[in-house]
Amino acid sequence: MATDEALVVELATGNEPALCELLRRYERPLSNFIYRHTAGRDVEDIFQETWLRVVRQAKRFDRNKRFSTWLFQIAINLCRDWHRRAPEEASADPKESADASRPIDRAEARLDADALLARLPEPQREVVILRYYHDLSEDQVAELLDCPKGTVKSRLHNALARLLALTKEDKP
């Protein structure tokens, strides 16, 4: 089985099966990543634009780097652009929409988690998503975001403190 990096080299020569294999390998993780960054909005558009850029820039891929890091860097940049362009939407107050007399099911808990993530500043949201949703190490997150490991640790610490404060705010 060819490595991701070998497939991207083949893709640069116009090998369509190489693209199909990369898409197969990364469809779910990339879609989930984009979903978490955009709270589920415009996922398909950003997903498609990410792969268009991969195809267009395959010849410039640095063979000494990991393909997954390069792919997710492209997606992060597109998500950042999306956040700059996206109109601020008023988020519904979770206290008003939830019936306190019934237990919260998994879907509601996921929506609550997504709502809390959306309230974090973008740099903190990125490290939380990469570290805890995609199970990347702090070193891998630092490489992906092109920042020092200490910055990743600081952002994680501040994000978790902010999430804790937000959950306390939302309690009756």
Image (tube, rainbow, N blue to C red):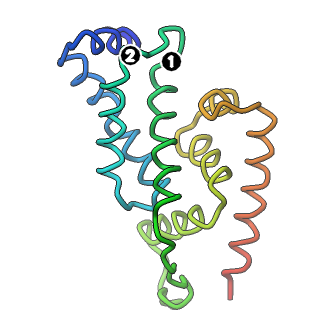
When asked about the image quadrant of residue 122, the answer is: bottom right
Q: Quadrant of the C terminus?
A: bottom right
Q: Which residue is mark 2?
A: 4
Residue shown at 62% from the left, 41% from the top: 131
The image quadrant that residue 75 belongs to is top left
Residue placed most toward the observer, 87 or 26? 87
Q: Label 2 sits on what residue type?
A: Asp
> SS of the residue at dot 2?
helix
Crowd class of label 2 (few under 14; some 14 to 19; many from 20; radius 10 Å): some
Which label sits on residue 125?
Answer: none
Q: Residue at x 54, y 45 (%)?
A: 133
Image check: 44 left or right of 77?
left
The mark that comes first in sequence, 2 or 1, is: 2
* Separation of residues labelled 2 and 1 (CA atoms): 8 Å
Callout 2–callout 1 Cβ contact below 8 Å: yes
> In the picture provided, is 6 more to the left or to the right than 84?
left
Instruction: Residue 30 in the image: state x and y as whole percent.
Output: 39, 40
Instruction: Please say if 101 is above or below 59.
Output: below
Residue 60, given in percent of the width and then of the height, sits at 43, 16
Q: Residue at x 18, y 17 (%)?
A: 17
The residue pinned by badge 1 equals 66
x 41%, y 67%: residue: 107
- Is residue 127 placed above or below 122 in the rendered structure? above
Image x and y of residue 21, in percent: 25, 22
Percent coordinates x, y for residue 19 in the rendering: 25, 22
